[in-house]
Amino acid sequence: MIVKMKFISITGPKDDIDRVAGQYLSKYEIQLENAVSELKTVQNIAPFAESNPYKEIVQKASIYANELPDSASEEVSLSIDECIALINQLEERLSPIEEKKQQLQETVVKYRASLNDIAHFRDLHYNIESIMNFKHVKYRFGKIALEYYDKFEQYIDNDLHTIFHRCQSDSEYVWGVYFVLAAEADQIDAVYSSLHFERFYLKGDYKGTPNEAYNELESAMKELEEQIDSLDKEINHILSRTAAQMRFARERLTMASENFDIRKLAARTLNKKDTFYILCGWMSEEDAAAFTYEIEGDEKVHCIIEEDTNHTQPPTKLKNPKLFKPFEMFVRMYGLPAYHEFDPTIFLALTYTFIFGAMFGDVGQGLLLFAGGALLYRFKKMDLAAIVSCAGIFSTLFGFLFGSVFGFENVIDAVWMRPISHMTSLPLIGRLNTVFIIAIAFGMVLVMGTMVINIMNGLKIHDMESALFGTNGIAGLVFYLSVAVTILLFMTGHKLPAAIVLIVMFVLPLLVIAAKEPLTALLEKKPKLIEGGIGMFLTQGFFELFEVLLSYFSNTLSFVRIGAFAVSHAAMMEVVLMLAGAENGASPNWIVIVLGNLFVCGMEGLIVGIQVLRLEYYEFFSRFYKGTGREFKPYTK
C-alpha cells in the first residue's frame, strides 16, 4: 500500500530554523523539497547563502570519537558551545602528541625500508661502509632469478674477471654482490645484465657489516615502536577521561550539522526588517497530524498543510504487512509505483508464490526451500531469502496436491492429480495434459484481473483512454472475457451464442479499441478528433488491431509454461530415481537420490523463479503498471 502524503510549508523567524529542525523535524520523516524551486512564482525570496560552521568540527569530533576506548555509557548533556569547547581543548592537548607520533611513524617506515633492503645481504661479512668507499674496485648489489642461477654461476666462475658473493635466497631469487675492477666495470655490468642479474641500490647509511647494520636498525625500530605505544597510551588516557562527553559531542554536533544543512533546501524572505525562513516538503498524513499538534503552542512556528497541490509529484512511501514486505524488492526492480498508482506488492506476492508452487510442486524440496530461506532471512536479513521461504510453502502445498516427496510418487497419495500422467480429452484437440489446460485457464483469469486493476487505475487518475478504450481497458476486457466464455462453452459441449451476440461480443470491442483516439478526443471535447487524416488512421488502426489480437494470443499461450514446468519437474525427478535404481524395486542408491534432489532443487528452483518473475513483469505488470514513482527519502536518512 502507498502511504498517503501531505505537502507542508513551515515558516518562522530566520534565526529560529536550527531550533525548529532540532526540536521538531528531527523526530519525523519529512522529505524536504527545494523551497525556492517550489515557490518559483513568489517574489522576494532567495536561497540561504551560509556555509556550514559545524563541518570541520564534526570531522575532528569523529576522528577523536573513533579512537575512544570501549567504556560504559554515561548520561551527559552539553550545549553546542560546550561541545565545541571540548573538541578544541582536546585538539590543543592532543595535537603536539600526534605530531610527535607521526614523526616517529615516518622514521619507523624509513627504518623498515632500510631493514628490508639490507636483510638480503646479511651473509656478507664485510664492513658495508668500507665497500661503499672503494676507489679502484666497483661493487654491485642485486639479485638473479632462481631459474637462471645455475647457468649464471657456471659462466662467471670460468670466464669473468669478477668475484660474486652469494648471500641469501628465497623461492624466487638469489641475492648477492659482485666486485669488479673499475676499468672493466662497464663491460662486466653488460655481461651480468645479459645473465639476468637485476641491480639493487641500497638506500640509507649503514655501519658495520650488513648483519650488524640489520641488528642496529631492528633495535632502533623497537625503541621507536615503544615510544609510539607510549604516546598511544597517553592519547587513550586523555580521551578516556572524556569518553562519555566525547561521544555525546559527536552526536550533538553531527545533528547540528545535519540540521544546518537544511538551509540548502530552505528559502528566506528578503524583507528589510524581519527575515523569515520557508521550508516545504512531504510528510505522511499521520506524521503531519502529529507535527501540527506538537507545534500548536509554539508561536514562532507556522505550518500550512495542503491537500491537493500543484507542486512536484508526491514521493512514494510503501507500507505493506511484514509478510509481504520482502516482495517490495521485485517491485523496486521494475520501478516504484507513482503516488496515485496501484501498489502491486501484495498482488505480486500472492501470484508469485502460488505460480512458483504450481511449477515446482514437491513436499520435500519445498520444505528445503522454506527452511533454507527462513534461516538465511533470520541471520542475513535477505529479502530474496524470505521470498524463497514463502515460495517453499506453496511448493510444499502443491507437493501434497501432486503427491510428490523428493521425487517419490508412491509415498503419499495425490490429493488432486499427478501432473505427468493426468490427461483430458478436448474437442478438435484430443487428449491433452490436464495441467496445460488449467494453466491457460488460470492465466486467462489473472489477465482479466490485471485488466480490472488497469481500469480502476485509469478511472482514478482520469485516464479515460486507458480505462475505457484501451487494450487493457473495458473494451479489451469485454473482448477477452467473450473469448474466454466462448472457449469454455465450446470445450464443455454447450451451445454457442447467436451470431449477432458473437458480433457484439467480438467485433464491437475491437472497433472501440481501434477508434480509441477519436473516442477519447470526443469524450474530452477536443476540436480535432483524428490526427493525420482518415487514410493514416485506418491503416494504423488495422495494424494495431492485428498486433492486439496477436498479443492476446501469445500472452495467453505464455501461461503454458506453468504446466510445462510442473510436468518437467516430475520428469526430471523420474530420471534421478531411475539413475538411483529406484525404478527396479531394489534398494536405491541414496547418494544419487540426495545429490539429484539437490541439483534439481537448485537448478530448477532458480529457473522457475526467473520464469515466474518474467510472467509477473511481462504478462501482468505491462497491463496496468508503469512504475514511474520516486522514492520517499527523509532528510534525516
Image (spheres, helix red, strand yellow):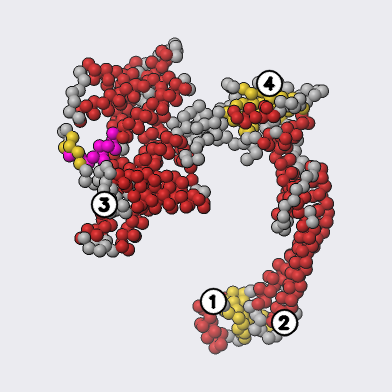
Image label count: 4
Residue 538 shown in magenta: no
Q: Identify the secondary structure beneath mark 4.
A: loop
Drawn side of residue 365 relative to residue 501, left or right: right
Q: In this view, does 346 lie above or below 521?
A: below
Q: Which residue is drawn at 54% across and 84% down?
A: 153
The CA distance from mark 4 to mark 2 is 81 Å
Magenta residues (range): 431-441
Q: Identify the secondary structure beneath mark 2.
A: helix
Q: Where does label 1 land, which residue?
A: 171
Q: Where does label 3 land, which residue?
A: 409
The residue type indicated by label 1 comes to Ser
Q: Which of marks 1 and 4 is in front?
A: 4
Comparing 113 with 85, the one in front is: 85
Q: Identify the secondary structure beneath mark 1.
A: loop
| Residue 463 position by quadrant | top left
Circles 3 and 1, Cβ within 8 Å, touching? The answer is no
Q: Where does label 2 land, which residue?
A: 212
Q: Is residue 610 above or below residue 555?
A: below
Is most of the magenta stretch helix, strand or loop? helix
First along the sequence among labels 4 and 2: 4
Drawn side of residue 370 relative to residue 264, left or right: left
Drawn side of residue 263 relative to residue 95, left or right: left
First along the sequence among labels 3 and 4: 4
Label 3 crowding class (10 Å Cα cut-off): few <14, some 14-19, many 20+? Answer: some
Comparing 419 with 266, the one in front is: 419
Circles 3 and 4, Cβ within 8 Å, touching? The answer is no
Circles 1 and 2, Cβ within 8 Å, touching? The answer is no
